[in-house]
Amino acid sequence: MRIGILTSGGDAPGLNAVIRGAVLTGIKVHALDFVGFRNGWRGVIEGDIIHLGRDEVKGISKQGGTILGTSRTNPFEADGGVERVNAVMSENGIDAIIAIGGEGTLAAAKRLTDEGVRIVGVPKTVDNDLDATDYSFGFDTAVQIATEAMDRLRTTGDAHDRCMVAEVMGRHVGWIALHSGMAAGAHVILIPERKTSVEQICKWVSEAHDRGRAPLVVVAEGFALDTMDDAHSERGLDAFGRPRLGGIGELLAPIIEQQTGIETRATTLGHIQRGGTPSAFDRVLATRLGMAAMRSVVEGHWGRMVALRGTEIVHVPFADALGKLKTVPDDRYEEARVLFG
Ligand code: F6P
């Protein structure tokens, strides 16, 4: 049996550990053969394929990015479609695909599976916003990077007696902001799930400042003030037609400065949160997901993705996994809110 692996959508630290986990298990336990599609679904459509053997996956768990490359290509657009996917698979003797990607990738995988293509999915999102898995790889690394950055922002903020605003990723959900903000002892955490007023934000900032602290405000890119209809976007649309986010921190900083009289600076962490070495937690989770995806292939669980439930890896049908965002529950936000100000 020959398996094709692809990584698609925005990258996340741990992608290479998934590839290695799947390939090593497939070779060592099941004597299978592997190829990699380059640049996500684009490699499937274009038949852009590389050999994946033990040498190719040697030592890659600790590498960020993806050795296969990635893209946001939709396999049903341009020259794609199920016939093209089937043709490329049969020309190259590929029996099944392991697709590692987020909501868009898995939605395409579901559509192809519904039309008979044999696919197993592995969920990927640094935002940790897929409901079907308790944690996704890449999230822990992003939180660690953001926390370290905030520790640094706090020392320069203290030195200048400034309010520091740190913008982190989180398109629909505030998990990175909540966890990194709590870890760094932020005085305000702003998440997409909770619209908040300028007055409330400035009240928390002033309270912290009155106690002699340099206030730290953590804001997720998808946050909106209670006066805004949508998240702040000034950079056009991405390949899926979604608004490119980023800039809410820069928007808030002058407002906070003007309303509180406290000198304020903003820093956008951006793609630094997705780059570099994955944490040990992410390497282990990603390796286990890759190994479990391999088992799914051998058992013929097409149309399912692997997921973490508690400490166990489970198999979830695409239909149950898609379209459900894992938002920050109210009680988790209220718990953090006790320490604001
Ligand atoms: O979905 C993950 C994510 O990192 C979001 O938090 C962010 O809005 C988006 O990807 C950025 O995408 P790109 O890499 O295309 O700029």
Image: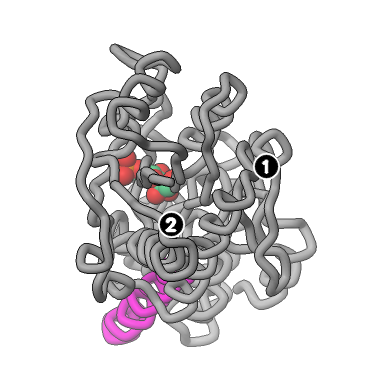
User: Which residue sits furthest right?
Assistant: 331
- Which residues are drawn in magenta? 139-163
Circles 1 and 2, Cβ within 8 Å, touching? The answer is no
Q: Is mark 1 within 8 Å of ligand 1?
A: no
Quarter occupied by residue 274 = bottom left
Please provide percent x and percent y for residue 218. 47, 64
Is 151 inside the magenta-drawn segment?
A: yes
In the image, is residue 9 above or below residue 200? above
- In the rendered view, tell whether residue 213 sits above or below residue 231: below
Of residues 95 and 85, the one nearer the viewer is: 95
Q: Quadrant of the C terminus?
A: bottom right
Relative image position of residue 115 (x, y in whole percent)? 57, 19
- Residue 102 visible in rendering: yes
Q: Which residue is mark 1?
A: 321
> Alpha-carbon distance for marks 1 and 2?
40 Å
Q: Image point 57% across, 35% down: which residue? A: 227
What's under tag 1, amino acid-wise?
Answer: Ala
Residue 116 vs residue 246: left or right? right
Residue occupying the point 32% across, 85% down: 155
Does the magenta-highlighted stretch encompass residue 143? Answer: yes
Instruction: Considering the whole magenta stretch, tell me its main secondary structure.
Output: helix
Q: Which of the marked residues, 1 or 2, is nearer the chain's N terminus?
A: 2
Amino acid type, mark 2: Ile
Quadrant of the rendered image containing residue 308: bottom right
Asked if residue 169 is positioned above or below residue 164 in the image, the reply reads above
The disc at residue 239 is none
Q: What kind of element bears circle 2? A: helix
Identify which residue, 273 or 289, lies in the foreground.
Answer: 289
Residue 40 percent coordinates (x, y)? 32, 38
The residue where tag 2 is placed is 256
Q: Is residue 265 left or right of residue 103?
A: left
